[in-house]
Image (tube, helix red, strand yellow):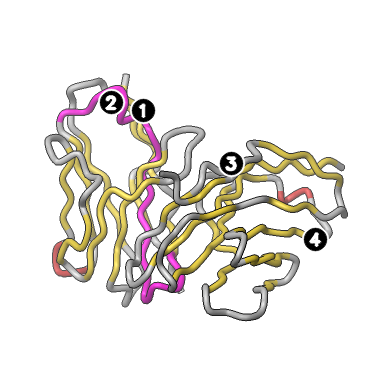
Amino acid sequence: AQKITQTQPGMFVQEKEAVTLDCTYDTSDQSYGLFWYKQPSSGEMIFLIYQGSYDEQNATEGRYSLNFQKARKSANLVISASQLGDSAMYFCAMREGSDYKLSFGAGTTVTVRA
Amino acid sequence: EAGVAQSPRYKIIEKRQSVAFWCNPISGHATLYWYQQILGQGPKLLIQFQNNGVVDDSQLPKDRFSAERLKGVDSTLKIQPAKLEDSAVYLCASSLMAYEQYFGPGTRLTVT
């Protein structure tokens, strides 16, 4: 079974607008972590934001915020005030229990239009 | 702080040939990971090292893939012999703790 599901293969957003990228996850562990990474066309994976399963507040990092809904098992990424440089592939990932390895979703391509 | 280094950045080989990739993690990071990312998919973990010991290699095709991490620092990933389906980007990552993994630029392998 898929641990991470990203249902939006591609999205277009106008510059300066906000965009929400969906991510749902599946785990039976009580302790887990959720990550979002950005992968530009150059290929490197850039860490954006992290949410722990016991964190009571939604994580925020600059223009990135994570909408964590534990009961629904969703961890959506919100990018506010989109910039042209935000055009990239975005991956949601999860770490379970004491395991360090990450399970990644299939990714969502974001294209920001001027 | 220097990031994760990988080489080569690109490699083209014919099927049945062998190839090796090198990774130098961030200084002090005990955990090192190799991921395979096939075009249009998310990365898939191949092998995870803690210092120079293997923690998880359950998804490593051991009949053709091998990896080592000597002295708990640098690591090499080898494919021998390569198949067409091995065409992918091979990403190396390292972490100090479970909180965050730092990725290298990747090696794009094309098998013809």
Residue that numbered label 2 is attached to: B13
Residue at mark 4 to residue at mark 1: CA–CA distance: 37 Å
Cβ atoms under marks 3 and 2 closer than 8 Å:
no
Quarter of the image with the N terminus of chain A is top left
SS label for mark 3: loop
Instruction: State the residue position of label 3.
Output: A41
Please tell me which residue is depicted at 59% across the width and 67% down the height of the picture: A70
- Residue range in magenta is B81-101
Indicate the chain on which mark 4 is placed.
A
Q: In the visual, does B48 lie left or right of B62?
A: right
Question: Which three-letter amino acid code belongs to the residue tagged 3?
Answer: Ser
Alpha carbon separation for disc pair 3 and 2: 23 Å
Q: Badge 2 sits on which subunit?
A: B
Q: Earlier in the sequence, mark 2 or mark 1?
A: 2
The residue type indicated by label 1 comes to Thr
Residue B110 is marked as 1
**Chain bearing mark 3:** A
Q: Are marks 2 and 1 in contact (CB under 8 Å)?
A: yes
As helix, strand or loop, the secondary structure at mark 1 comes to strand
Vertical position of residue B40 compared to residue A58: above or below: above
